[in-house]
Amino acid sequence: MGKIPEIKSHISYVRERQLTTVTFNNSFATLPEVFYTKQSAAPAPNPAWIATNTRLASELGIDPAFLSSDAGLAMVSGQKLPQGADPLAIVYAGHQFGGWSPRLGDGRALLLGEVAGYDIQLKGSGRTPYSRGGDGKSAVGPVIREYIVSEAMHALGVPTTRALAAVTTGESVFRETALPGAILTRVASSHVRVGTFQYFYANNDKKALLTLANYVIDRHYPDARKAENPIQALYAAIITGQAKLIALWLKFGFIHGVMNTDNCQIAGETIDYGPCAFMDDFDPMKVFSSIDQQGRYAWGRQPHMAHWNLARLGEALSPIWGTDEDAAVEGIQTTLEAFGTAFNTHFQNAFAQKLGLNTPNTAFQETTFQTMATQSVDFTLFYSHLRRLGTGDHQSQFTALFNDKAAAESWLEQWHATKSENGVAPDESQALMKAANPIYIPRNHRVENAIQAGTAGDYAPMYRLIEVLQNPFEQQKGADDYEDAPKPTEVVQQTFCGT
Ligand code: AMP
Ligand code: MG
């Protein structure tokens, strides 16, 4: 294949007008019009704050005082955008639960532009040409969920989109009942998805595919340009990012719930906190989402499904691979093989760390999973008590997690033996576990509680939860309740997209 034409001009073409304190660049808006539709936000009759993330604002170079001002509220409710913001809805396609949808796109979201290289997007801001039957709006519940969980994921060290602000619109949206309407301001490295590539692949638009690949290389993977085959290097880099990401999801018991190709982001960030959940009792086939009847996106199936999504991406890249079709197919398959190895390395290392081992022991890991599953052990407490075994009454609390005390004692014996065999120094072992085993995760019942209170206009539980989850690895005074597994009456069995 010939040299990929540079699209640096797109990136550096900065439509930049200083206004108050936010300056938007719009690299996406400089792409050809087949990529998006310009669209403004729906009116919001009475915008009001739910939350602002002043820490993230500072990281982006946005003046927190501006963000919290009336002008900031007008911006994040889509009512009065700073000049230079150029709102648009991006088109994409995707496989949803394995079924092909030829045109999805931002049906309830608008990209305002970029600040400090990050996309600033309003989610819930009204209809777009991609809304299909939907109203383009969000209810307050999913906005609160995404705010809490995405910020918690960030604090856990998992690549993710972020939440800059959340507001109510003053309008009701109708789901099963009337609910307060809300808008989340999402921040992401970009909003390009596997489904964005699939859209142009399905439309036989080779030119747009190449433009998109170049855009992604320039924006996320500039090293790929130096490779002999930049498309292959781009694909390899995306594969590496997904392998790392999914291993982190598993490490913390996270279940995304809707790993469709349109929710698989090219920059390797977790995106779309719909029916996501963290598992309580360990069960590799655990599913929460009400729509995932077959368990397609169960905790333990996530690596498999990421691999499937990446195979779809490979297909979509085939027309621009730069070789004849047979060679492209072979090149794509060979490149994709790296996923399994990369994922396994991250996964084994992460779970070794969680046990305070400096090298993985696959046989003992297998035993551990088996024991956790048969004993219905709470995943997070298992590891967080383990890291604190020598202190307080964590030994008895650890044992109490098991159905059967003898099984706990037998497992602990094997664990001590494995650590000796591993030769890890006690201090190092402790440090490994402290860094890998959070004490606080966004427990489903806590998130649900924050959503219910927030829907009734009381955001205090949401604020407190956000505060605790900012330091998930540090024991916090007065936060014991946030550590606890749900009582039987509090267990969340199912989550809903709520869209
Ligand atoms: P999701 O399952 O949240 O990733 O969304 C899948 C597709 O449905 C995307 O194209 C969304 O933009 C669209 N969508 C979800 N909710 C709505 C809504 N309330 N109005 C319009 N489109 C929506
Ligand atoms: Mg989505």
Image: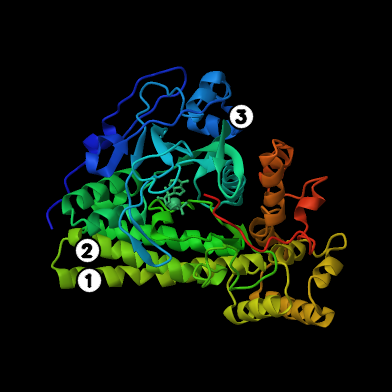
Numbered disc in front, either 2 or 3: 3
Amino acid type, residue under disc 1 in the picture: Val
Depicted 3 relative to depicted 63: above or below: below
Nearer to me, 236 or 150? 150
Residue drawn 63% across and 62% down? 494
Numbered disc in front, either 1 or 3: 3
Q: Is there a contact, CB below 8 Å, between mark 2 and mark 3?
A: no
Closer to the chain start, of discs 2 and 3, is: 3
Residue tagged 1: 329
Q: Mark 1: which secondary structure?
A: helix
Q: As drawn, is 97 to the left or to the right of 495?
A: left
Amino acid type, residue under disc 2 in the picture: Ser
Task: Respond yes or no on whether mark 3 lies under 8 Å from ligand 1.
Answer: no
Residue tagged 3: 49
Residue drawn 53% across and 61% down? 257
Amino acid type, residue under disc 3 in the picture: Trp
The disc placed on residue 318 is 2
Depicted 262 relative to depicted 379: above or below: above
